[in-house]
Amino acid sequence: MTDTTDEPPVSASASLSASAPRSAPAPGPGAPRHALLVCRHGETDRAMIRRAVDWATAVGASLSVLGVRDLPGDLDRIARSTGSGRVDLENRLLADHRATLEAAVAEAVPGEARPDVHVRVGKPFLEIIRHVQAQGHDLVIKTADDTGGLSRYLFASTDQHLLRKCPAAVWLQRRDQPLSVRRLLVAVDVDEAMASEPDTLAGLNRRLLDLAVGITDATTEAIHVVHVWDAPGEGLVRLWTNAPDPDRAAEAYVSEVQGAHGRALDQLVADARAGLPTEQAASLPLTARLERGVVRQALPALVDSLSVDLLVMGTVARTGVPGLLIGNTAEDILNATDCSVLTAKPPGFVSPIGV
């Protein structure tokens, strides 16, 4: 049943997981198969490489590592000053970056099967997206960039571009937090009647839930599936009703709206469970939560109150407008949330970045 209380819900499966560790789940329909870890600073990425390898092993995903070397703006002047050609200088930068990254991978994963290492040179977000398109990755994992003294909640330019334009799911990890999937919050919008593209929204909701389930491992304690709703006509019903008791009429209206949203949310969760093996579906700590309020305020507050490690949400509302955030609501939420985020686009999304 949908939880509508103010206290964090506790499911039977979540309680069970606290007393007996669950085995790693079998890969579900939305589980990443071909993940890409982006490293821009090999010297500081060893811990992230190790955690990403451990996570990929736990969920049965392949993992590759990509290093992107941005070019100096005055590369031509540098080339002339060193007596080298531009292409030669680019090749030297690429070789140096590869050596640094391969050394970091070797140190992070000693004596084991290591992920493939790739390097590219150019504008980071463009090269990441082009590599994803060329290699068919379905998940990008990256440490969120520092914002040069701005609020630590804001995502830097490269990350914003990835959130809007990368066709693969994007996992941005806060620098001071571990790569953790203990407590997830999956933000969905089941109000399809108000959507400009109902089928697109339905597909996005299912993709988010499948993705969240697909990245979980034996350490996962809770997956909160949250829908923030409101009853905008409550005041009008109270003001204009012909019923003898305006308050009761307004309450009935709110109850009807809440019931419709709750049933839709419960159905979404039930459908997600139905697509899993019976044992996994029974043990998965998946709970539905209905929260009344304003979404850009309610979600960050829930992230804090539920001690969420990872927020899972969509960043694109319509397939026909590439890079359009959901009325800027998604951007507001992501920039107001102090946790790592995993974002996805709806089925049918086409990146505006060409291969």
Image (cartoon, grey):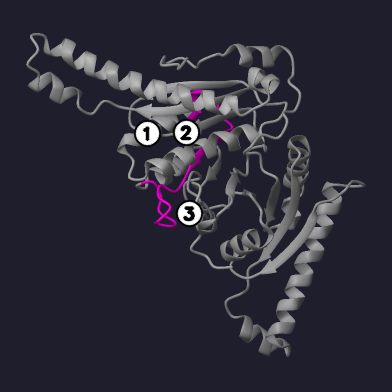
Kind of element beneath mark 1:
helix
According to the picture, the residue beneath numbered tag 2 turns out to be: 187
Of residues 228 and 319, the one nearer the viewer is: 319
Q: Quadrant of the C terminus?
A: bottom right
Q: Is residue 5 above or below residue 160?
A: above
Of residues 283 and 326, the one nearer the viewer is: 283
- What's the amino acid at mark 2? Ala
Q: Nearer the viewer, mark 2 or mark 1?
A: 2
Mark 3 or mark 2: which comes first in sequence? 3
- Residue at (71, 88) in percent of width and height: 85
Real-space Cα distance between discs 1 and 3? 19 Å
Real-space Cα distance between discs 3 and 2? 17 Å
Q: Is residue 304 magenta?
A: yes
Kind of element beneath mark 3:
helix
- Magenta segment, which residues? 303-326
Q: Is residue 115 magenta?
A: no
According to the picture, the residue beneath numbered tag 1 turns out to be: 295
Kind of element beneath mark 2:
strand
